[in-house]
């Protein structure tokens, strides 16, 4: 809680009442240390003979040493209480740096996703028909509640978003309908017009939109949104932890209303976790806190129905399917000014209604992208698109998925240029790539998770824990044996090291494959409790290793006893 109180005090310009974390135990350590020093001086003064000049000099030296030690304790305690404030100028610099980083990040991502090449897909979005998933209309918008927007006119959607009372928007839709794409488009538009909005708003804080996968939010560890948001900002944008920003810029931005969180993929959580997140959002958002959330329509509607309460003040929008004419116009824009004859035949069948299966596939952004990636980007003959009419839309969709991997590999040849950061360094084999992806799809099934966490891939390899434990045991045994051969003898050290190494390796490496990656944060202020918890959790292993080592040394001593007696 200190972090949040410190941010509040920094915003108000008051740093007198800010108490850093661990102040209690630091004070206790200082008092105990000074008490021990005083007791030591008293004990020595009582034992020494004051009439002896040498003893008086020793006592004086001890008193000087104790005074120096006490001064060090006081300096340490004072330094622990001294916390650099988050100055207004530093906070504004942190805002600017974060805005630039976010804009650069998602501009690059939008180029990779071809969001504006040649133009955004013309997907229309409207207010959800089911009013049960939204708050009362007067909590969402002044006047009549109505939202109608298009993805190819994102500026209009940004204007309507700003017109919402609390600027809270839920983007729902079926799979492949462009929810995340719309969130990225809206993020870039809000960033691009942030300066102009700031001039109109005057001194009002214009939050910086930051897109984060909501699957990383553990509501048990971080019950409030802004607690988790502060941690994620520091992790994803480490420049916010720079000393010139006071070391608390991420928390200051999160709790100071400077961030518009765009939380992507609520449907990727389990049913139980989805309801927890919605409850946590309602408990976390103050009246002026904005938020944008994406989720599949069915999962979001079911979660709200289970809770019995919508996200307070949030508008919910859903997409319309593309018409055949809209899909044909988009495909035409991707083709040359004079399309090939095969493409003219496909587009004519699409617009005339002669290819209903193609029209159904092309009615979603995912299907339209598949058609483009497989047949336009690779300059392939599109005639098969109108050969699947008797088989149905599902057969055409399966056909497109079968061709997707070879098409992507063909469209993205290998490059060793240092400027091609997102190109493969060597040519991929389509069949091998299909096997790898099929393996991942089998290990990370959609009914369990929709998020392939790369650090969990090692846990899918059979016997990895045992192999890691054996390797750790061998390394530990050899290291301990070589290091302790002088004190205990080579055989004893190797035996103790191998036994302890195997036990510790199987224990530690068994959990290692399930751990999420992280990074070290310095200084360790405020994490003393975590340190003691870690020490306590590893105490059992430490005691076991010490017992094994002691038994090994004892057995060596017993074995050496007869030989020593004979030598005597």
Image: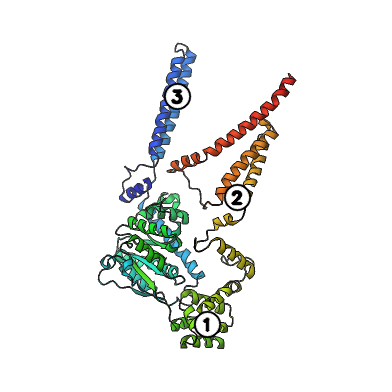
The quadrant in which the C terminus is found is top right
Mark number displayed over residue 467: none
Task: Kindly identify the residue that appears in the image at 50 percent across and 64 percent down.
Answer: 446
Q: Which structural element holds mark 1?
A: loop
Q: Earlier in the sequence, mark 2 or mark 1?
A: 1
Local secondary structure at mark 2: helix
Query: Closer to the observer: label 2 or label 3?
Result: 2
Q: According to the image, label 3 marks what residue? A: 64
On screen, residue 284 versus residue 324, left or right, reads left
Residue 18 higher or lower than 252, as above or below: above
Alpha carbon distance from label 2 to label 3: 56 Å
Crowd class of label 2 (few under 14; some 14 to 19; many from 20; radius 10 Å): many
Q: What x and y, as percent, mark residue 306?
A: 36, 61
Please give the name of the residue rendered at 34% of the width and 71% of the height, measured from the top-left corner: 128
Horizontal side, residue 258 vs residue 376: left or right: left
Instruction: Work out how far the residue at label 1 is from the one at label 3, CA to CA, in angstroms.
Output: 87 Å
Instruction: Tell me: residue 495, above or below residue 218.
Output: above
Residue, disc 1: 335
Q: Position of residue 67 (x, y in %)?
A: 43, 26
Please provide percent x and percent y for residue 468: 62, 49
In the displayed structure, 129 sits above or below 459; it is below
Dividing the picture into quadrants, the one containing residue 215 is: bottom left
Q: CA distance from mark 2 to mark 1?
A: 52 Å
Residue 543 seen in the current view:
yes
Q: Earlier in the sequence, mark 1 or mark 3?
A: 3
Q: Which residue is located at x 61 percent, y 68 percent?
A: 434
**Which residue is farthest right?**
567
Occupied quadrant, residue 140: bottom left
């Amino acid at each position: 809680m200190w972090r949040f109180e410190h941010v509040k005090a920094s915003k108000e310009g008051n740093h007198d009442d800010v108490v850093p974390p661990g102040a209690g135990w630091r004070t206790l350590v200082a008092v105990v240390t000074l008490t021990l020093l005083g007791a030591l001086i008293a004990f020595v003064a009582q034992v020494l003979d004051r009439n002896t000049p040498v003893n008086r000099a020793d006592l004086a030296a001890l008193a000087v040493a104790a005074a120096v030690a006490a001064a060090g304790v006081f300096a340490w305690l004072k330094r622990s209480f001294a916390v650099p404030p988050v100055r207004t100028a530093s906070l504004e610099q942190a805002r600017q740096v974060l805005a630039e980083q976010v804009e650069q990040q998602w501009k690059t991502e939008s180029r990779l996703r071809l969001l504006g090449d040649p133009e955004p897909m013309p997907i229309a979005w409207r207010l959800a028909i089911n009013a049960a998933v939204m708050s009362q209309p007067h909590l969402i918008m002044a006047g009549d509640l109505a939202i109608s927007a298009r993805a190819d006119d994102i500026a209009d959607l940004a204007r309507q978003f700003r017109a919402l009372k609390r600027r809270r928007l839920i983007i729902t839709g079926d799979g492949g309908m462009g929810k995340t794409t719309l969130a990225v488009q809206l993020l870039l538009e809000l960033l691009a017009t942030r300066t102009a909005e700031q001039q109109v708003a005057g001194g009002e804080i214009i939050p910086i939109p930051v897109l984060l996968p909501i699957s990383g939010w553990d509501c048990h560890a971080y019950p409030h949104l802004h607690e988790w948001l502060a941690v994620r900002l520091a992790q994803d944008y480490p420049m916010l932890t720079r000393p010139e920003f006071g070391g608390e810029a991420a928390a200051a931005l999160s709790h100071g209303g400077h961030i518009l969180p765009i939380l992507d993929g609520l449907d990727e959580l389990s049913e139980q976790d989805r309801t927890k997140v919605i409850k946590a959002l309602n408990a976390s958002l103050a009246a002026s806190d904005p938020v944008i959330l994406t989720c599949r329509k069915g999962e979001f509607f079911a979660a709200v129905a289970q809770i019995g309460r919508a996200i307070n003040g949030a508008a919910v929008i859903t997409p319309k399917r593309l018409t055949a004419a809209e899909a044909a116009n988009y495909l035409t824009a991707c083709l040359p000014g004079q399309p090939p004859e095969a493409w003219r035949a496909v587009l004519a069948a699409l617009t005339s209604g002669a290819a209903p299966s193609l029209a159904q596939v092309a009615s979603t952004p995912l299907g339209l992208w598949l058609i483009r990636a497989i047949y336009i980007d690779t300059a392939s003959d599109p005639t098969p698109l109108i050969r699947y009419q008797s088989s149905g839309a599902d057969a055409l969709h399966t056909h497109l998925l079968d061709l997707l991997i070879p098409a992507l590999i063909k469209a993205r040849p290998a490059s060793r240029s240092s400027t091609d950061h997102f190109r493969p360094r060597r040519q991929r084999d389509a069949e091998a790539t299909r096997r790898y992806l099929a393996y991942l799809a089998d290990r990370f099934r959609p009914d369990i998770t929709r998020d392939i966490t790369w650090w969990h891939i090692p846990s899918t390899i059979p016997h990895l824990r045992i192999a890691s434990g054996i390797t750790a045991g061998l390394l530990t045994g050899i290291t301990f044996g070589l290091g302790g051969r002088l004190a205990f003898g080579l055989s004893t050290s190797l035996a103790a090291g191998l036994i302890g190494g195997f036990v510790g390796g199987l224990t530690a490496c068994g959990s290692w494959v399930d751990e999420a990656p992280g990074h070290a944060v310095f200084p360790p202020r405020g994490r003393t409790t975590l340190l003691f918890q870690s020490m306590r959790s590893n105490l059992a292993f430490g005691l076991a290793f010490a017992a094994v080592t002691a038994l090994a040394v004892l057995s060596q001593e017993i074995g050496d006893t007869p030989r020593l007696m004979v030598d005597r």
